[in-house]
Amino acid sequence: MATQIHQGPPPLPPHGGFGDGPRGSRKRGGESLSTWRYGDRVAYAMCWFCGIALCVIAGAIVLYMAARGLQYLNFTLLSTHPEAGLDQKKTGGFLDPIIGTVLLTIIGIAIATPIAVATAVWIVEYGRPAWLARLVESGIEVVAGTPDIVIAIFGLALFQQSLFAPLSLTADGGAVFGRSFLTAGAMMSLIALPMVFSATREGLQSVPALVREASYGLGKTKIATIRRVLLPSVRPNISTGMALGMGRICGDTAIVIVLLGATLRLESEGGIPGFNVLKGTGSTLTSYVYNNSPAGEGNAPQKAYAAAFVLLLIVVALNFTVDLIARRGSKTGLETGRLGA
Amino acid sequence: MRTHDDEMPKVKLPSLQDVMDADPAGSRVPDPVHGALPPPVRRIVLDQPPTVATPAAPQTRAAGAGAAPTPGHGGVRHAGEPGPERMRLDALSVFYDDKAAVKSVDLSIRQGEVLALIGPSGCGKTTLLRTLNRLTELTASARREGRIALDDTDIDELEVTTLRRRVAMVFQQPNPFPMSIFDNVAYALREQSMKRPGKAVIAPHVHDALQRAGLWDEVKDDLDRPALRLSGGQQQRLCIARAIATRPEVLLMDEPCSALDPKSTEVIESLILELRKDLAIVIVTHNLQQAYRVGDHVAFMYLGDLVEYGAAEQVFGAPRAQRTRDYVGGAFG
Ligand SMILES: Nc1ncnc2c1ncn2[C@@H]1O[C@H](COP(=O)(O)OP(=O)(O)OP(=O)(O)O)[C@@H](O)[C@H]1O
Ligand SMILES: [Mg+2]
């Protein structure tokens, strides 16, 4: 009944069952491998090897990035704006990409969460007409499976329509630029949405029918049941999905390059304070890393490493949050397994 | 279908032998199977004086409805006239798709008494119970025929949310909400209005409900604990507290003790006898001893039919129908 969600690729620490049930039922002590059939022994060794190999790879990435990143990382890098220049010493830090990453993540998740939660509630609690529910679910699966670069160019085509002109810069000739934090955030939400959706859906599905009946039995409407009983009890699931989705947004490059402009600095647009930043362009750590890697035009690999390390820290922190939320979720008691007993 | 509601001699706690001797139908056959008398376990959970000599104060009735207060029963069964009729079922049938689960049942449910619904598995007890507050409507394939009246109003004419507040349900499995103990009861109390009463307003009512469900003393110090951390018996009493918080007129209980140990069962049974003063209770149970201990009237169902209805002593002591005899026979042997 534990409601942890294993979604997508982020290297989650393998949290198996939050204290429900005996952890690792290690009865293998007395059992000798030599009694196993040869084939089983080989299979066992393979599984063991794969597990270790994954750990080593994950560790290698983190250690290598930490070693390279820490070598070049300093506070000035974190707190100064980037500058254009040929000399690495004069190109400043990556404050703007950090702000850009945070801003874009917040916009993306803020758009994705309500839509995803509402959709999940509708699918699980109403789900009628059934064909429409199935269609919506397949739609979300398609979005989840679409490469981000495809989402990015679709977004560009969409937001360059004059209908969406208020969201980005409009050139003198009337052409809509289509690139801004708002447009990139909107497309980023598509990347986070499937994660929040499936986490919420699974949470709702794991709430026993008994609980719903109890609420209806007290004379509560469906809406009241959803608001006061179901949503509070799946809050840990929603948070988990959000953290996973934010991890995806942080790590995305294609949408940033196509839709955020990947400009060196935050470029405000228009006169409304606050909104001008959102309407403007910018960059994120991912695009900064790309541009400063040997593949990009900046070619400042040290800074790329430092920025990549910061990005990695953010993602690891998010994953850590997922774990924390999931653990805390068990405080609602839903995971104690008492419900069915 | 309701046969005679013979009221038993009231002064003394009637032993089953007395009852059977007094049975007007005189149908008792002292055969070896069910001639075996139920042990006088009755009222074992209630420390009541054996007489009703002291007139108890009239009970305060729950939730308006304007009916006259029932005379106090002092906890002794069948002391006094039956309370006013609260619910009435006329030719009630329930179908799942085209299969009848309840077949043309007539029944009346009275204020101040416990009606025990017994019968073999699958005979439609749960279905009947859930129909009374229209919970069967949550099952798409279920269809109902016949009339159910609550205080002479057809339940179809009531707002379903109102009906379920007046006819509350306690389920077989304890099913508290995954929230704190306090919130479990508070949730039941809060009306669906835009303005939600604050904690201070609602706290006395929560206290009252927990008190009446006999749970207050055990949980008063940690009302903020998740309800799911309570023991099964405590959870079930919390569910009862939740159900009676809105002061319903009828309380439906579907095998409320089936998931509980004997001790918790005893606690809940005495609770039922306590609550009976204020409301009409319908309890489904597979435990015939329990039906006998708490039931004032007993209804026996078989394959969707109401086979027998009568005072508990009569149904257990001198069942009229052969089916009933087969079912309750041996229950106390
Ligand atoms: N949701 C449902 N859909 C279809 N048939 C159902 C449904 N619920 C119950 N039934 C059928 O209706 C009949 C009565 O079921 P019900 O649950 O009322 O029995 P019961 O007397 O409560 O049994 P038990 O003592 O085992 O709880 C059974 O034959 C059952 O198969
Ligand atoms: Mg049942």
Image (cartoon, coloured by chain):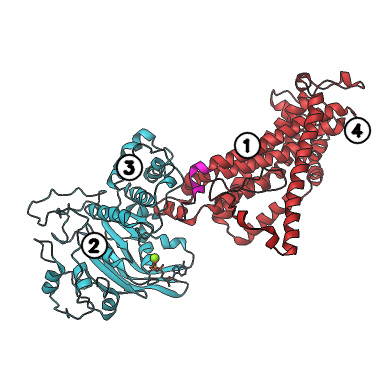
Specify the colour of chain B: cyan
Q: Which amino acid lies under the numbered mark 2 shown in the image of this protein?
A: Arg
What is the CA distance from the residue labelled 1 to the residue labelled 2? 54 Å
Mark 2 belongs to chain: B
Instruction: Give how far across and how far down residue B49 sits, in percent.
Output: 12, 54
Q: Chain of mark 1?
A: A
Give the residues in magenta.
A330-341
The answer to whether marks 1 and 2 mark residues whose Cβ atoms lie closer than 8 Å is no
Residue under disc 3 on the same chain as residue under disc 2: yes
Q: Is residue A166 visible?
A: no
Residue that mark 1 sits on: A321
Q: Colour of chain A?
A: red
Amino acid type of disc 4?
A: Pro
Residue that badge 4 annotates: A294
Q: Quadrant of residue B102?
A: bottom left
Q: CA distance from mark 2 to mark 4?
A: 85 Å
Residue A166 in the image: state x and y as whole percent: 74, 33
